[in-house]
């Protein structure tokens, strides 16, 4: 019985830790565009895409600062399916072409059907990311 109680406590702590981390930074949950579309349909949410390249300095700055802002994290985790895509890997170069991308980072908000609602290019602050997300929600 003590063993089961210990397992229960560990599970609660692990879940709390994951929840706390998700509130402190944007949780990019989808691992591919197709997975993001499936999640968006199932949860009836728009999709937020961080389209980046590994060599991109402003992309790294977004990840280190903007995406770790508590207010931005709370907003995006509650309202979007978040996906970060390295646009130079796998099938993503085809998506970059399809989406008309010209620079990194490109942040895009899609509706749950995959239609582009809004995009922006380059580094933005957390305050501007919140404005961007709010505008994306209004365009649904």
Image: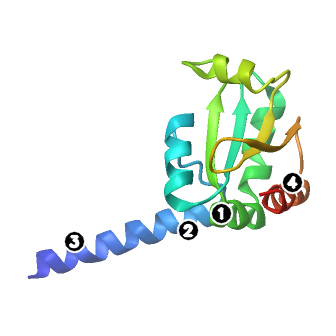
| Nearer-N-terminus badge (2/3) | 3
Q: Which residue is label 1 attached to?
A: 24
- Give the alpha-carbon distance from disc 3 to disc 4, as whole Å: 42 Å
Front residue of 94/60: it is 94
Marks 2/1 in contact by CB < 8 Å: the verdict is yes
Question: Does the image show residue 70?
Answer: yes
Marks 3/4 in contact by CB < 8 Å: the verdict is no
| Numbered disc 3: secondary structure | helix
Q: Which residue is label 4 attached to?
A: 132
Question: Which is in the foreground here, disc 3 or disc 4?
Answer: 4
Q: Which residue is label 3 attached to?
A: 7
Question: Does the image show residue 54?
Answer: no
**Residue 12 at x, y percent in the picture:** 36, 74
Q: Answer few, some or many: residues within 10 Å of disc 4's Cα (few below 14, many 20 plus, some between 14 and 19).
A: some
| Nearer-N-terminus badge (1/3) | 3
- Give the alpha-carbon distance from disc 2 to disc 1, as whole Å: 6 Å
- Give the alpha-carbon distance from disc 2 to disc 3, as whole Å: 20 Å
| Numbered disc 1: secondary structure | helix
- Give the alpha-carbon distance from disc 1 to disc 3, as whole Å: 26 Å
Q: Which residue is label 2 attached to?
A: 20
């Amino acid at each position: 019985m003590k063993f089961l109680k210990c397992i229960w406590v560990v599970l609660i702590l692990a879940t709390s830790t994951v929840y706390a981390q998700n509130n402190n930074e944007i949780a990019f949950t989808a691992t591919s565009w197709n997975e993001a579309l499936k999640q968006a349909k199932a949860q009836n949410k728009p999709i937020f895409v961080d389209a980046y390249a590994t060599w991109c300095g402003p992309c790294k700055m977004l990840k280190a600062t903007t995406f770790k802002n508590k207010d931005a994290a709370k907003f995006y985790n509650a309202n979007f399916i978040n996906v970060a895509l390295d646009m130079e890997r796998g099938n993503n170069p085809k998506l970059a072409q399809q989406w008309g991308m010209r620079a990194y980072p490109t942040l895009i908000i899609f509706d749950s059907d995959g239609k582009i609602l809004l995009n922006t290019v380059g580094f933005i602050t957390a305050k501007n990311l919140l404005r961007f997300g709010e505008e994306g929600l209004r365009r649904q």
